[in-house]
C-alpha cells in the first residue's frame, strides 16, 4: 500500500518523517505542491490522530491503483461540488434562512427523512419570486476549491461525471453547461406565474434515488462497481456511496466520514486526483 498525505499548506519534513516512521514507509515522494506519496506503508493506529492534529488528509491506496482505473465520478452538488446549500440561500432571499437551514442540518445528520425534510423546506418558499433562483446562482453559488482542477484531470482520463443532487434542476443544468459535466439528475421546483408554489414536481430524488441513478449510469456505461467513485458530504449520500467501489467524504458529517473509503477534511476537491496520482 501507498500512503497519500496532503494538505492546503506546506508540510514540514519532520511531519512527513514522523508519519513515514509510523507507517514504516520505504520512501517519500512529492506528487503535488502539498501532497506526498509514502511508498510501501502500513497502517498504524496513531496516524489518524497525528494527521488530524496537523490538518493533514491521508489515505492508504493500493500501489497499482491510479485515476485511469476509473470510468465514472458521481458527485453531490450542495456543499460538495459547490460551497453552498442552494435551498438555504434561496430561503435567505425570503428572510427564512435560519428555519430552512435548521431542517437542512438535521437532514444532513440523518435525523430527518430527506424527502420529508425537502417538502418542509420547499413549503416555506411558497410565494417567492422565481428570480431569486437566478440571484442565488449569479451572486452566491461558488465552486468548492479544486473543483475545476479535479474535473480537468477526470476529462483527461476519459472519466465521465454525474452530478446527482437532492437540490434543484435549475442549478444542476447550469453547472452541467458551465463545467461540461456528462450527466445530471435533481429535483424540480414547481413555478406558476413566476412564483414558487412551495411544491416539488414529481418523485423526490432522495438517498435511494441517488443510489439508483448511480447504478443506472454505471450499467449504461458498462462499468464495474470498482470503476466508480462517489463523493458526498451528508447522510443523504450514503446509499449512493455504498454503490461505488471508492467513496469519498468531502468536508463531511461524521456519519459520512465513518463509512467512506477516504475522507478529505482539509484539502479541496483536487485531493481526489492526488489520491490516485500515477
Image (cartoon, grey):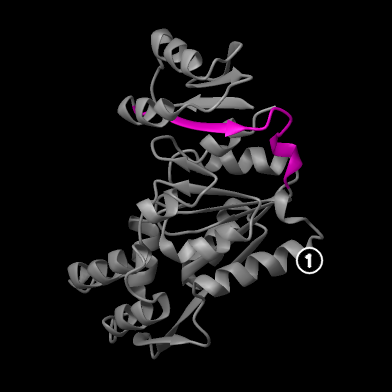
**Side of 69 where 27 appears, left or right:** left
- Name the residue rendered at 38%, 77% in the picture: 113
SS at mark 1 in the image: helix
Please tell me whether residue 171 is drawn above or below residue 148 in the rendered image: below
Task: Give percent across and percent down for residue 106.
Answer: 29, 67
- Residue 61 is inside the magenta segment: yes
Instruction: Name the residue tied to disc 1.
Output: 220
Quick check: can you spot residue 51?
yes
Task: Give percent across and percent down for residue 1.
Answer: 64, 27
Q: Give the range drawn in magenta.
A: 55-70
Task: Give percent across and percent down for residue 6.
Answer: 47, 26
Quick check: can you spot residue 56?
no
**Side of 128 where 201 appears, left or right:** right
Choose top left, top right, bottom left or bottom right for residue 70: top right
**Side of 267 where 66 appears, left or right:** right
Quarter holding the C terminus is top right
**Side of 91 where 236 appears, left or right:** right
Task: Give percent across and percent down for residue 177.
Answer: 59, 59
Q: Which of 201 and 262 is in front in this view?
A: 262
Choose top left, top right, bottom left or bottom right for residue 27: top right
Choose top left, top right, bottom left or bottom right for residue 127: bottom left
Q: Which of 154 and 37 is in front in this view?
A: 37
Which residue is outermost to the front? 45
- Name the residue rendered at 65%, 29% in the picture: 277
Amino acid at each position: 500500500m501507498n500512503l497519500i498525505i496532503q494538505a492546503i499548506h506546506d508540510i514540514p519534513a519532520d511531519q512527513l518523517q514522523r508519519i513515514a516512521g509510523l507507517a514504516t514507509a520505504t520512501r517519500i515522494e512529492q506528487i503535488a505542491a502539498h501532497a506526498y506519496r509514502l511508498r510501501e506503508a502500513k497502517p498504524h493506529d496513531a496516524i489518524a490522530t497525528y494527521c488530524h492534529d496537523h490538518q493533514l488528509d491521508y489515505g492508504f491506496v493500493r500501489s497499482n491503483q491510479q485515476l485511469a482505473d476509473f470510468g465514472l465520478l458521481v458527485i453531490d452538488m450542495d456543499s460538495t461540488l459547490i460551497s453552498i446549500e442552494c435551498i438555504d440561500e434561496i430561503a435567505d432571499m425570503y428572510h427564512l434562512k435560519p428555519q430552512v437551514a435548521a431542517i437542512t442540518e438535521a437532514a444532513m445528520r440523518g435525523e430527518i427523512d430527506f424527502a420529508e425534510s425537502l417538502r418542509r423546506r420547499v413549503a416555506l418558499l411558497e410565494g417567492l419570486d422565481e428570480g431569486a433562483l437566478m440571484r442565488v446562482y449569479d451572486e452566491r453559488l461558488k465552486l468548492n476549491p479544486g473543483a475545476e482542477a479535479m474535473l480537468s484531470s477526470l476529462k483527461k482520463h476519459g472519466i465521465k461525471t454525474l452530478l446527482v443532487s437532492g437540490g434543484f434542476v435549475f442549478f444542476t443544468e447550469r453547472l452541467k453547461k458551465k463545467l461540461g459535466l456528462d450527466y445530471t439528475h435533481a429535483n424540480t421546483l414547481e413555478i406558476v406565474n413566476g412564483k414558487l408554489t412551495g411544491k416539488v414536481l414529481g418523485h423526490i430524488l432522495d438517498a435511494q434515488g441517488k443510489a439508483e441513478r448511480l447504478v443506472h449510469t454505471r450499467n449504461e456505461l458498462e462499468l464495474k462497481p470498482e470503476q466508480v467513485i462517489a463523493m458526498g458530504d451528508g447522510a443523504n449520500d450514503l446509499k449512493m456511496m455504498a454503490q461505488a467501489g471508492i467513496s469519498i467524504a468531502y468536508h463531511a458529517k461524521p456519519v459520512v466520514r465513518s463509512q467512506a473509503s477516504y475522507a478529505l477534511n482539509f484539502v479541496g476537491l483536487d485531493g481526489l486526483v492526488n489520491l490516485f496520482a500515477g
